[in-house]
Amino acid sequence: MYMQWTTSKSIKNWEKKRMKMKSSKRQKQQKNLKSWISKHEFRGTTKDNINNYIGQRYEADEDVYVETLIPDLPSELQSEVKRHICLDLLKNLTIMKDSGLAKHEPLLLKICDSLKPVFFNEHHYIVKEGDPIDAVFLITEGIVWTCTSNNGEGSGPRHAERLEKGQYFGGKLLEWVLTPTSDDMYNLSKLPVSSKTLKTHTKVEAFALMAHDLKQIWHSKLSRLGQEQLQSKAAARVQRIWHRNHPKTDDSNSIGGGSRKLQKPAKPVSTVVTKQ
């Protein structure tokens, strides 16, 4: 009887300890989730839906972590959350503005829906110099450093660049997809190689746009365009790049001046802008 009593008492004490630990764990989870919701400034229905989902998970006695929250959300709520966090960030990317894609909201919404949330601890290598770039990382929380060794490129010193919320890494992949050649148009066996190392300084939250998803979205857009439009867009892009690298002179500014060969592409460019 004494042994049964001591065993029963030990079990009760263990249960109390376990419940206390679980309660402390839940409190920490709730604090982290509230902090995450506040940081991203969710409002109205979206905020209520997130909180309702978290409440249902807790009622079912399941743990809820910020790192796994978004992938576990219902698909429609997932899209709302990703668009809320990343849509404006995408619109403000220089490469999106320069290519004119910042004005194509349906395309940007598709990109948002394809983004994958990723979390990294401090001092973690995300990409190393020489690695293939298979994703674009949109930084939504935390600090990362990019650095290059300048190997084989003269005797210049090593340097690092700080990236924070609202910035991104993987521009080479964006350029590679947005300006494809005939050889790599539908080919994922070749990827650009990183000339920099990407390493976290603090804990980092980011959203990754994988090369496969980016290619698929971009090709879907191209497939809806006719060959004439596609050629006009290519001509417009080439002309923009040429003018960016060759500032106008007084002769090219004058009416009727300059080479006619440089003036001819102006017609398709204006047509493309009108259609967009």
Image: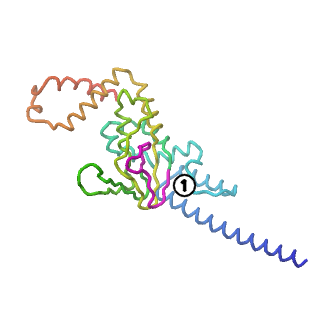
- Kindly identify the residue that appears in the image at 21 percent across and 38 percent down: 244
- Kindly identify the residue that appears in the image at 44 percent across and 42 percent down: 134
Residue 98 within the segment the image draws in magenta:
no
Residue 126 within the segment the image draws in magenta:
yes
Which quadrant holds residue 214? top left
Q: Position of residue 242 (x, y in %)?
A: 21, 34
Query: As drawn, which residue projects farthest toward the right?
Result: 1
Which quadrant holds residue 87? top left
Colour basis? rainbow
Q: Which residues are magenta?
A: 118-138
Image quarter where the N terminus lies is bottom right
Nearest the eye: 90 or 106: 90
Q: Which residue is mark 1?
A: 67
Nearest the eye: 147 or 141: 147
Image quarter where the C terminus lies is top left
In this picture, residue 199 sits left or right of residue 29: left
Which quadrant holds residue 170? top left
**Vertical order, 232 against 146 (above or below):** above
Q: Amino acid at mark 1?
A: Glu
Q: Mark 1: which secondary structure?
A: helix
Query: As drawn, which residue projects farthest toward the bottom?
Result: 2
Q: Position of residue 156 (x, y in %)?
A: 24, 55
In this picture, residue 103 sits left or right of residue 76: left
For disc 1, the neighbor class at 10 Å (few under 14, some 14 to 19, many from 20) is some
**Vertical order, 232 against 98 (above or below):** above
For the image, the number of numbered tags is 1
**Vertical order, 170 against 13 (above or below):** above
Q: Position of residue 225 (x, y in %)?
A: 39, 24
